[in-house]
Image (cartoon, rainbow, N blue to C red):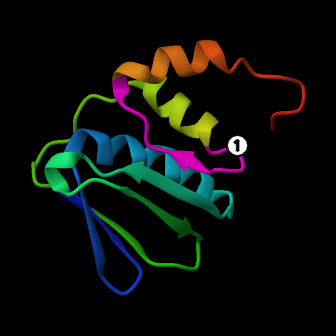
Amino acid sequence: MGSLVYGAGTKYEMDDRTLAHVKIAAGGKLRRQESFYLSWVIPPSAGSGRVSIWLSPAIPLQFHFSTPTAPQLNRVWVKALEMTAMSDRGMVVLPENEADDYIRDHPPTLLTP
């Protein structure tokens, strides 16, 4: 289990595979100087609920992984995460097995950047 370290040291646990995909999707937006919400569901095994944090290039952000090697990335999942960030809700960490359906159900329009 890795962790996303936000701001002055608030840590949020996330499995390494998910964290690696969030890192790539969020990194693209932050490189473009875009701020956005990042939201995810807390599983019942960790107490339930949900978390939303405001990501901005001005706020320190670290990704700590528990495994020494990076996983093979699923480009469809990265694309789905990037697409969720275009909504008012911001980037929503959806499960990898829902990425294809999300992309299919949210086709690009002329209004999306």
Question: Is 92 within the magenta?
Answer: yes
Say whether residue 31 is left or right of residue 66: right
The x, y position of residue 56, in whole percent, is: 59, 70
The x, y position of residue 90, in whole percent, is: 62, 51
- Height in image: 56 above or below 29? below
Q: Residue at x 81, y 38 (%)?
A: 113
Question: Is 94 within the magenta?
Answer: yes
Magenta span: 85-96
- Residue pushed farthest right? 110
Q: Toward which corner of the image does residue 75 lie, by quadrant?
A: top left
Q: Which residue is mark 1?
A: 86
- Height in image: 74 above or below 47? above
Circle 1: element type:
loop
Secondary structure mainly formed by the magenta segment: loop
Residue closer to the observer: 34 or 54: 54
Residue closer to the observer: 61 or 40: 40
Q: Residue at x 38, y 40 (%)?
A: 21
Q: Residue at x 25, y 46 (%)?
A: 43
Q: Residue at x 70, y 43 (%)?
A: 86
Say whether residue 70 is left or right of residue 56: left
Name the residue type under label 1. Met
* Residue 64 seen in the current view: no
Residue density around tag 1, few if under 14, some if 14–19, many if 20 or more, within 10 Å:
few
- Height in image: 57 above or below 104? below
The x, y position of residue 36, in whole percent, is: 63, 60
